[in-house]
Structure formats: C-alpha cells, structure tokens
Image: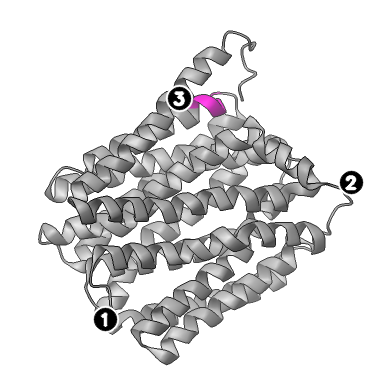
Amino acid sequence: MWPLYAAGFTTAFGAHGIAATLGSNSEDAVTSLLVLGGLLALYDGAEVLLKPLFGTLADRIGARPVLLGGLVAFAAASALYVMADSPGWLWAARLGQGAAASAFSPSASALVARLNPAAKHGRAFGSYGFYKSIGYTLGPLLGGVLVWAGGLRLLFAVLAVLGAAVAVWATVAVPVVPPLPKARQTVLDLARRLADPSFLAPTAALAAATAALSVGVGFLPVSGRAAGLGTVVTGAAVSVLAGCAAVVQPRAGRALDDGRLTTRTGLAAGLLATASGLACAMLPGLTGVLLGAALIGVGTGLITPLGFAALAASTPTERLGQTMGAAELGRELGDAGGPLLVAAVASLTTLTYGFGALAAAIGTGAVVAIVHRRSASVVLKPGTDR
C-alpha cells in the first residue's frame, strides 16, 4: 500500500504545489484571473478526457502497468519545463502532467480497493486520502518555498525526481494484480450503471468537493496576496485546508467501517461544511483565508473516503478500474469547472462573488442530499443507507 500512498501524494503535491504558487505571483504569463483559471483547469481538463480510458485499460491489462506508466510520464512532463523554461512550455508541461495523472490516479484507487477487503474499504480509502492530503498540505507550503528559492523550474525539477522515485518504488513493491474475467458489457449496460444513484450520488459529492478544493488552493492565495501576505505565508495559510482534510479523512473512514457514520449523512455534512467554507472565503483578509481553508478541508475530508468507499462497494470487482476512472472524470469536471466558474464570475464582478457563486451551487447540492435522505428514510430500514 505504501507506494500507492506515495503515488497519491505525488499527484496532490504536483497539482496543488504548482497551483498555489501560480496564484500568489504574477510570473510565467499568469497575468489575469482568466489565465490563472485556464492553467488550473488545463491539468484537470486532460484528466477529464483520459481518466475513463485509462480506468478501462486498467481493467483490461491490470492496474499495475497503467500505474507505472503514468508515474514515468509524470516525471517526463515535469522535466520538460525544467529544460524549456518558457511560458508556452509551462502550458505544455501542465497538460502532460494532467495526462499522466489520468493514468496512475484511477489505477491507484482500483488497487486500493483490490488489495483490501470490503469491510476495510473506509479505512483504506481514508488512509489513501490522508497521504494525498499530506501532498495537498505540503504542496502550497513547500511549493512556495521552492519557487521563492529557485523559481518554477526548481519546483518542476523536484516533481520530476519525485515521480521517477515513486515509479521505481512501485515497480519493486506493488504486487501484480491480474485483471479479472468479466462478462461482456454493452454501451447501454455501462450507461445504466453510471446512471444509477449508487454511482451518481457519491460522484457528484466528490466533484463538488474537488471543485472547492481546487478553488481554495488556486484562489485563496489571490485573496492572501490582496491582503498583503507573501508567497510563503499564503502557502502556509492555504495548507490549513489540506491539513484539515488529512486529519478528517482517516477518522471518517474508520467511522464508516465501524457503522458510526453512514454514507448519506457523511456526504451531506461534508457538502454543508464545504459550502460554508466557500462562504467564509468571502470575508476579507487573513480571517477569510483561514476560515475558508479550514471548513473546505473538513468538508472534503468527509466526502472523499466516503464517496470512494461507496463506489467500491457498489461496483463489481472486475469493473473497478472503469468505475474509478468514470468517478475521477466527475471529480475532474469539478476540479476544472470550479476554477473556471469562480474566474468567470470574478472577471465580471469580484473574486468575492466568485466564491459566493460556488458556495451557492454546493449548498444547493447539500440541501438536495438532505431532502433525499429524509425521503429515503421513510422506506429504508435503519442502517441500510450506508
């Protein structure tokens, strides 16, 4: 499991370490909120297109080779900007990193599910999310330090070495998990499975959490800069978001496995906390940054392990890669759409209203989830809403 945790750390550290530093300085052609939103969305846009394909490939040939190939490609894309060092190649490198992450991210999730019994999926995904959150935590902080010390080239160089090291580690330590035989599936069968509430509900919650997370990491530094905070201080403040998520995720996973928390209750509470965090981000200065980061972190910490555990529980084992890839597609739509929504609203008004727009959208989703839970409780027996 440790190389899988390291893979999760790598993608989180790379994605948010760069995103946070782009938002806190105006170098490398990041000259407007729309350009910033585009760079934040580019990484995730590649994942939107490719994650379902790589997830299906993982089911067909095995998750391990897809994981290894993605890590090697991530290291190569990071090294590209180190050698080129120009604004145009920054866009190309981010696109390459996103394409590589689309291979090893769903593969790692599928392996987490395959290598752990169903009764421990909450703990397994909670631990995986914990180490991923450590990457989110250290990304803005260490990313700010590295950019301050040597610019974006130094940060990309560290990512290239990290990706290569994890690839070697995974090659040695991750066991071979052969693909399972599966019945023939038509496009209609796939559509039915993906349209089922057991897939849609957790995926929508994961998309909302990822949208808020991406906006928090990308745009809270902009608020910090407006308040006069430097790059390192802003990175440390935004790291509160990932730190809170890291603390909450293992506890949420254990509570799910022990029956102390249900999926529906946890997802609804997570959505409410996330929306509240975005609303707090509308407050000016350091107060808004810290409160927004903390509540967004708590919300995403609740949603992430519960959402993935629910998906694993409702999916045939031989289709885990495909389901995780499709769920990751939903997440990346949120990851790309969140920054674009906030950037578009902010360009027409102010960043405060951008935070408010996303808070309203996620808050509406929380209300719908709560109403649906109360309606379902009329026909479900106690304990069946896991």
Residue 60 vertical placement versus 285 (above, below) = below
**Quarter-of-image position of residue 87:** bottom left
Query: Label 2 sits on what residue type?
Result: Ala
Query: Magenta residues, as a range?
Result: 260-265
Whole-number angstrom distance, CA of label 3 to CA of label 1: 47 Å
Mark toward the viewer: 2 or 1? 2
Mark 1 sits on what residue? Answer: 149
Question: Is there any visible trace of residue 246 in the rendered image?
Answer: no
Q: Is residue 168 left or right of residue 317?
A: left
**Residue 189 position in % (x across, y down):** 78, 41
Residue 327 vertical placement versus 160 (above, below) = above
Q: Quadrant of the N terminus?
A: bottom right
Residue at point 27% right, 56% down?
Answer: 219
Mark 3 sits on what residue? Answer: 368
Whole-number angstrom distance, CA of label 2 to CA of label 1: 54 Å
**Residue 217 position in % (x across, y down):** 33, 56
Whole-number angstrom distance, CA of label 3 to CA of label 2: 35 Å
Q: Is residue 71 left or right of residue 225?
A: right
What is the secondary structure assignment of the residue under circle 2? loop
Q: Which mark is residue 183?
A: 2
